[in-house]
Image: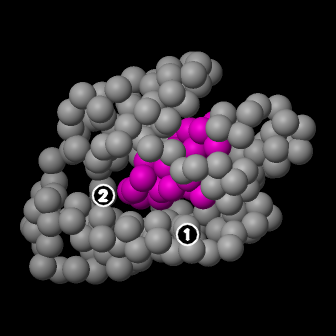
Amino acid sequence: MGLNFEYIEGQTPLDEDEKEGLLLKTISTRGELDEFEQANIQDAIEWSMKSKISREQLLSEDFILLIHKKMFGTVWNWAGTKRKTTKNIGVDKTQISVELRKLIDDCKFWIDNSTYNPEEIAIRFSHRLVKIHVFPNGNGRHSRLVADILISKVFNNPVFTWGHSNLTKKGTVRREYLDSIYKADSNDYKPLIEFARK
């Protein structure tokens, strides 16, 4: 199939068998892939913003998988399914469901006990989700949409702006985003929250 993509910092390379999951066999460049994925993601964003989504729905493994399927289902046959390979980032593939369950339970606790303010809850959830790295690819974009759904549907607050930029493109805004992610890795969430509202 000749898919040979260039990856930039923070992107997870696809294994050959994952590349085989491409549904659109005419795609041969990263630019074409980005274009088709973005169209699919836009449909998922519109669906999520129009849909009535309860806290119980959102905070479930099935719904988290469904969001990924909605975002990438017209491009990848593995969309919405947990990765079956170990990556350079994320938990071991055998721990994905366990870590997802812990994250969901933690988020319910944060909400029930007002442990953090709504924005920090959504950002912490998004950050932990991307660190688990549930899927072969698209984890950053997926975690940001999940944060948007959480902040808008559960807390009735506006969606995040995420630097008003395409974070899949190399540049200063992506660099700032990655820097704020690395700080969150050390439990300093302030820069990531500020970036998400920039």
Q: Residue furthest right?
A: 113
Task: Tell me the colour scheme of the image.
Answer: one colour
Q: Which mark is residue 48?
A: 1
Nearest the eye: 128 or 175: 175
Mark 2 or mark 1: name the one nearer the start of the chain: 2
Q: Where is mark 2, residue-wise? A: 15
Q: Which mark is residue 29?
A: none
**Disc 1, SS:** helix
User: For residue 54, which quarter of the picture?
Assistant: bottom right
Above or below: residue 45 compared with residue 123: below
User: For residue 125, which quarter of the picture?
Assistant: top right
The residue drawn where x is 38% and y is 66% is: 41
Distance from label 2 to label 1 (Cα)? 29 Å
Q: Using residue 111 as the reference point, say whether residue 176 is left or right of it.
A: left
The residue drawn where x is 55% and y is 67% is: 49
Amino acid under disc 2: Asp
Q: Using residue 58 as the reference point, say whether residue 94 is left or right of it.
A: left
Nearest the eye: 118 or 1: 118
